[in-house]
Image: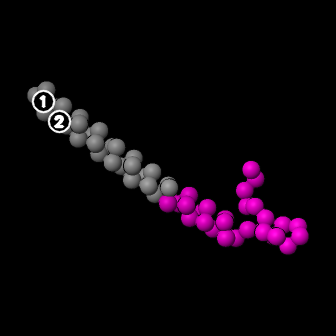
């Protein structure tokens, strides 16, 4: 009975880790797309130069 519970617990942990990694990949892709959009669609700064789209 204990080995069965350990196997089920291990499967649950691995499934949870896989789901978390997949979610992190989707978040990384979304952040990359937002960054690229912000990089190419920048407001014009004074003097006609392209301004920074971030504050820092």
Is residue 35 part of the magenta span, yes or no?
yes
Assess disc 2: are there few (<14), some (14-19) or many (≥20) residues with their C-alpha within 10 Å of its C-alpha. few
**Element at label 1:** helix
> In the image, what residue occupies the spot 39% across and 47% down?
20
> In the image, what residue occupies the spot 50% across and 55% down?
28
Residues shaded magenta? 29-56
How is this picture coloured?
one colour
Q: Quadrant of the N terminus?
A: top left
**Element at label 2:** helix
Spatial separation of the CA atoms under disc 2 and disc 1: 6 Å
Residue 17 badge? none
* Image-based side of 27 in relation to 44, left or right: left
Give the residue number, with chain letter if any, for mark 1.
Answer: 3
Task: Give the percent coordinates (x, y) of residue 13.
Answer: 29, 38
> In the image, what residue occupies the spot 79% across and 64% down?
51
* The image quarter in which residue 6 lies: top left
- 19 versus 45 height, above or below: above
Residue 7 badge? 2
- 8 versus 37 height, above or below: above
């Amino acid at each position: 009975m204990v080995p069965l519970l350990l196997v089920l617990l291990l499967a649950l942990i691995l499934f949870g880790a896989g789901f978390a990694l997949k979610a992190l990949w989707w978040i990384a892709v979304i952040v990359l797309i937002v960054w690229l959009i912000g990089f190419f669609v920048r407001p014009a700064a004074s003097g006609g130069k392209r301004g920074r789209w971030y504050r820092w």
